Amino acid sequence: MGPDDERPVLVAPDAFKGSFSAADVADAIAEGLEAEGVPADRCPIADGGEGTADVLRRALGGEQHELEVTGPLGAPVRASFTMLGAGGAESPGSAGQRVGGVGLGRRGSRPGPRTAIVEVAAASGLPLLARDDRNPLLTSTTGTGELIAAAITAGAEVVLVGCGGSATVDGGAGALAAIEEDGGLRGAKLICLCDARVTWARCAAEYGPQKGADAAAVALLQTRLAALARTFPVDPSDVPMSGAAGGLAGGLFAVHGAMLAAGAPYVLDAIGADARMRAARFVIVGEGRIDRTTLDGKGPGELATRARQGGVPCHAVVGENAMDPLDSRIIDLMEIIEATTRDAFVAAGRLLAAR
């Protein structure tokens, strides 16, 4: 690949949780590339977790609506939902995608149903709590349910629920109660964008410890979830992705027929990542920590896999590299660079330009 290659580099990081947004990382890496004369296509990505609303709004247009809702421990917090545009992108995109009968197309295409996106992390997220306050025996998804209800009141016919980054393992009990109190879905449909395939039956053991639960608390959470499942018209216990957001996805699936969709493919398709990847000389993915879980439904792992399948080289810029060498070979990453500051992201872009 010679110096006259005018193809851009696709710069497609996820958010560095708690520190940098996906767009901020993409801008910094692109700055480094462009300083060396290499064009960059800024393409922030997400997988249903933190930053998903921003990524989709950037690609499809839309408007944020902020309101006060119930936080994970009951105190009020300010959070927002986004009413997405009829389609369209600030950067090149696909002709759109269709999941569960819901189309997301480019601006100017035939408009689909009015679609909003709610992030669980915004109202019921782990970052909203100090480390000492994390206790999934006490936290609730009530605020997420209030956001869903507010989006429906604002006219949403479809609500995408980004099921990542929650502080909860309540099986969606709080959200379900808030939705019912506001009059139900009123004909709206729900699509849960999930960043992992964990089942409802496994979510307490899988996610409880990172949310503050010890072994005794995990056992109690499992008992609670099993009892809650028995009250539902459909048992979500063994359904893949039903454990996302501490079982919120499973609760919405069982009670309201929510569709459970893998978040990373959904978002990548909506922003036209495949076409942009094929037009690139190489791809740069990124996230705060790259490890085994990157291969299990995370956005960077999904895009790196697509790049490998498409024969496009892929590098990673990450806050921490905890990836086993064998795992990195599975997705064929050429290089993993650690960077934790904006200056380091710029330097990584310059280094990869020289490669």
Image: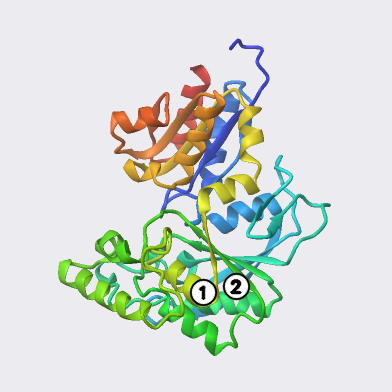
Of residue 184 and residue 6, the one placed in the foreground of this image is: 184
Return the x and y of residue 283 as percentages of the image width and height. Answer: 54, 30
On the image, which quarter does residue 103 sit in?
bottom right
**Position of 222 compared to 110: left or right?**
left
Q: What's the residue at 41%, 40% (across, down)?
A: 341
Q: Earlier in the sequence, mark 1 or mark 2?
A: 2
Residue 332 in sight from this viewpoint: yes
On the image, which quarter does residue 220 sit in?
bottom left
Which residue, given by chain and number where applicable, does mark 1 sit on?
A: 78
| Res 330 label | none
**Position of 230 compared to 277: left or right?**
left
Residue type of the residue flagged with mark 2: Glu
Q: What's the residue at 36%, 80% (across, down)?
A: 230
Q: Which SS class for mark 2?
A: strand
Which residue, given by chain and number where applicable, does mark 2 sit on?
A: 66
Residue 76 in sight from this viewpoint: no
Of residue 82 and residue 207, the one placed in the foreground of this image is: 207
- Compared to residue 226, the image places residue 276 above or below, namely above
Residue type of the residue flagged with mark 1: Arg
- Compared to residue 129, the image places residue 230 above or below, namely below
Q: Which SS class for mark 1?
A: strand
* Cβ atoms at labels 1 and 2 below 8 Å apart: yes
How many marks the image carries: the answer is 2
Per the model, the C-alpha gap separating discs 1 and 2 is: 7 Å
Of residue 292 and residue 33, the one placed in the foreground of this image is: 292
On the image, which quarter does residue 64 sit in?
bottom right
Return the x and y of residue 44 as percentages of the image width and height. Answer: 56, 44
